[in-house]
Image (spheres, helix red, strand yellow):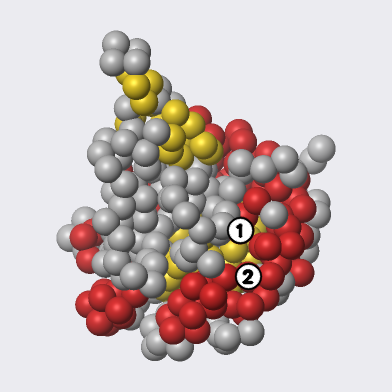
Amino acid sequence: MITARSVDLEVQLGRLKLSNPIMVASGTFGYAREMENIVDVSQLGAVLPKTITAEPRIGNAPWRTVETSGGLLNAIGLDNDGVDVFLEHHLPYLAKIGTSVVVSIAGRTEDDFVQLAEKVGSQEGVSAVELNLSCPNVSGGIDFGTNAESCRSVVAAARSKTGVPILAKLTPNVTKIADIAKGAADGGADAVCLINTVLGIAVDWRKQKPILGNGMGGLSGPAIKPIALRCVHQVAQAVDIPIIGIGGIANIDDVMQFLVTGASAVQIGTANYYDPTVSTRLIEQLPHAVAELGHQAVSQCIGTLRV
């Protein structure tokens, strides 16, 4: 008889092995230090600190976030202190938290991504690099996540300069996300992360103006989960590399839906804002859900959707 206690939670994302498939998404968990008195971060499969850029960014003008009926619309604009401050101030702490640290990076040009990947990937304590190819609310540069060849090129260039695993975070704001995922796979990505936020707008009808200072922003939370699941399903049929599911995950049913649809791991994002302990609770519940399917390992659940 299969019991929850005997379930193996380890997952393999290309060259990146995690103790369990529950990760926290960049931009929703700070630099982990902010959560140390609330969450035992060592239990997490991986922590993704806030996306960093080569130079400091002040981000977009307010308002930066708007609650919606089914989630959160944000236009933060990658507000961060830059890579040098991250390496000096944040990474030494992150390297000691007892779990995998995946550093999210973003650039305006391919050279930006390559230099960041090389600089960050050479640091002790960095388990992998996530290329944020798809932030929908940052002005300037190229959206590498909307073109398959651009995606392949930037992933390949980054891969050539760093030995750590590379994850490519893709946008749903495209006609055919499977083509972009193929580009990432051809470029040598260890896994693809699906999905980043869905482009949206909030309007103050009395002022007859957008509410967000940036005009448009990215929608996250429960409203986008069906879109994220659809993207995971389509990409799972198109590429052989692992998929990390993102979008509206807040309970164990959500986690299992992504796993059976084809994701090898998940990232918890918006739910961290209103329930910071959600990720560790999901880890506790996961063995019972896997055992309910009659499996002895999380890996046996992946991609078992019957269509």
Q: Are marks 1 and 2 in contact (CB under 8 Å)?
A: yes
Quadrant of the rendering where the C terminus is positioned: top right
Residue marked by disc 2: 154
Answer whether residue 223 is visible to the viewer in this image.
yes
Name the residue tied to disc 1. 144
**Which residue corresponds to the image point at 21% horizontal and 60% vertical from the top-left?**
34
Q: Which residue lies furthest to the front in this view?
A: 140
Q: Which of 53 and 168 is in front in this view?
A: 53
Where does residue 207 sit, x and y in percent of width and height? 28, 15
SS label for mark 1 = helix
The location of residue 84, given as percent across then percent down, is: 30, 79
Q: Position of residue 237 (x, y in %)?
A: 80, 51
Q: How far apart are marks 1 and 2 (CA)?
A: 8 Å
Q: Which of marks 1 and 2 is nearer the N terminus?
A: 1
Which quadrant of the structure image shows residue 159?
bottom right
* Three-letter residue code for mark 2: Val
Q: In which quarter of the image is the N terminus?
A: bottom right
* Residue closest to the eye, 267 or 176: 176
Q: In this view, does 210 lie to the left or right of 262?
A: left
The spot of residue 126 in percent (x, y) is: 43, 80
- Residue 125 found in image quarter: bottom left
Is residue 115 shown above or below 104? below
**Mark 1 is on which residue type?**
Phe
